[in-house]
Image (tube, rainbow, N blue to C red):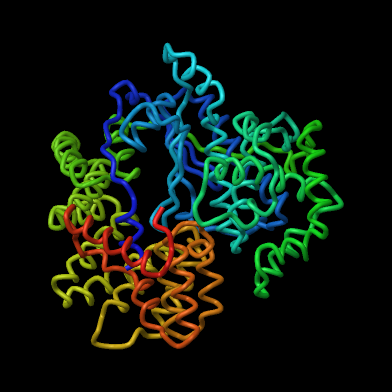
Amino acid sequence: MMKRALAALAATTSLALAPAALAADWFRAETEHFIVYAEDDEEDTVEFAQELERLDEVLSFFTGVKTDGEELPESTKVTVFRFGETSDMSVLLAGNRNTGVGGFFIGRANGSVAFVPRQRNKRRDRSLRNSIDQDMMLDPEATLAHEYVHYFMFQHADAPYPLWYSEGFAELFSNIEFNEDNFVIGDVPTWRSASLATIPIDLEKTFDPPARGDRTTTGRTYAHGWLIASHLNLNPERRGQMSEYMVAIGEGASRMEAAERAFGDLDVLHDELEEFRRGSARTLRVPYAANAEPEVEIRRLTEAQAARMELMIKSKRGVDEDDAQRLVRDARRLVAEYPQSPAVLLAATEAEFDARNYSEAESLAQRVLELDPESTAAANYYADVALRRSFEDPSQLAEARSRFAAANQMETDHAYPLYGYYLTHLFDESQPVPDQAKMALEASFSYAPFDQGVRQALIHMLLEEDRPAEARIVGASFLNGSGGYSCMLRKKFDEYGEGNREPLLEEIRPDHPGEYLDEAAREARQDEIEAEIEEYGCETA
């Protein structure tokens, strides 16, 4: 129910990458934590991949996360697509060239992806306003760094951080400077300068924002979030206080009570922040922990692999119904041209699957497995087809379960087969969910806490087991928002604690992925959500 609600409230977009955005000359670079597909030369691709690894190293150092010797699953590597200009990111994300998007990131159990341009736009709009906006626009690589911080924190230090800190901490690393033997953080992000200069510091509005945002909300969240996160992390006298804040929140304190317990006199904190805001940047220069340059394996893509890049990028971004049908035509043309290429066949599998052509997707996945028996991605699609079919034919649940188990044997620490295996039991009304399936979901969450579907399923499982305190902790990212939907969820959690369990259980229960809602049904569902939000006394906007 919740997944459908979030989807219904989200706007759909049409994708149309500019033809000039893609080229035949592509490289694939792989490091310890990243896979990069770049439309670039080899030297720049290697340098870009090394800087990504440096960012991971910096975050490990700064947060105290010990990853040395830790074998992370192959599936947790982030795949980064680097191509085109800034405007191509806007086209990819929103369907037009003028959104100002510098890049974006999507965390998924079946493969997290990021999209970043190779360069800023070559052409500027003639209007002065747009030129100024472009100058102040978030740097593309800063966007990627910001989003990777979120991913890293979910992966290694998952906690119910308030939005102002989550975004402010990510901003702290968004303009990191990499030098030959050290990194520097702490400079003011230029794209936040205007908000820092013009929006007065108001700690209550930042720490406990009103349900309905105003024109200063974004500035307080990101710019003032950066200011406070920098002060708490780079000022030795304030280090450790954020941990005290989180303990207070965990003990049930309100946001302002927690702030006073952790930070002391808030008037003093306000004055310190004012002094910081009006003074010079507080930077930190730290030597790299490892002297050697990060290792990068790089190769030029084959003709077939390069030919499927546009299809792959659009599919990984996510498509609506119309785009899915258009991509199928492209996919079938590529399959006819490169019938023995596992890369092409796998991209075509995803396109057919997105278009709900399950027989075609199943057949293609089998062909990929014949050519590449170790393709976990193909095995996941093969299993997912049976899971989707089980909505109309419950007998397919057993087949899906068997296929997900087989995919798990191929890569035992991949989050998605574990998650899919759990769902085959959740949707099986003939028997209770066994402990083995519950353990599979918990393992999936440990590998992919950044995937909102996996998180939602775990919240539901905890509630079914009458463990609401743990469910609140896992669900903090859903509950801590300032919008009407988060407000309604909080009230349903309160009802659950008072003994009325069903409204929350129904809301949180994962939707069957095989259920299809057409445009009219989605609009009707959105109307239902908004009406329910209002019934709970929460604002819809």
Figure quadrant of residue 540:
bottom left
Q: Is residue 98 left or right of residue 241?
A: left
At 78% from the left and 40% from the top, the residue drawn is 274
In this orientation, which residue lies closer to the viewer: 404 or 226? 226
- The answer to whether residue 285 of the structure is visible from this angle is no
Spot occupied by residue 524 in the image (x, y as percentages of width and height): 21, 59
Q: Is residue 46 left or right of residue 313?
A: right
From what the image shows, is residue 112 above or below residue 103? below
Spot occupied by residue 92 in the image (x, y as percentages of width and height): 34, 35
- The answer to whether residue 512 of the structure is visible from this angle is yes
Q: Residue furthest top?
A: 126
At 49% from the left and 41% from the top, the residue drawn is 30
In this orientation, which residue lies closer to the viewer: 429 or 282? 282
In this orientation, which residue lies closer to the viewer: 429 or 408? 429
From what the image shows, is residue 88 above or below residue 61? above
In this orientation, which residue lies closer to the viewer: 502 or 77? 502
The quarter of the rendered structure image containing the N terminus is bottom left
Q: Total label count?
A: 0
Spot occupied by residue 139 in the image (x, y as percentages of width and height): 55, 29
Spot occupied by residue 326 in the image (x, y as percentages of width and height): 17, 38
Q: Is residue 46 left or right of residue 189?
A: left
From what the image shows, is residue 86 above or below residue 10? above
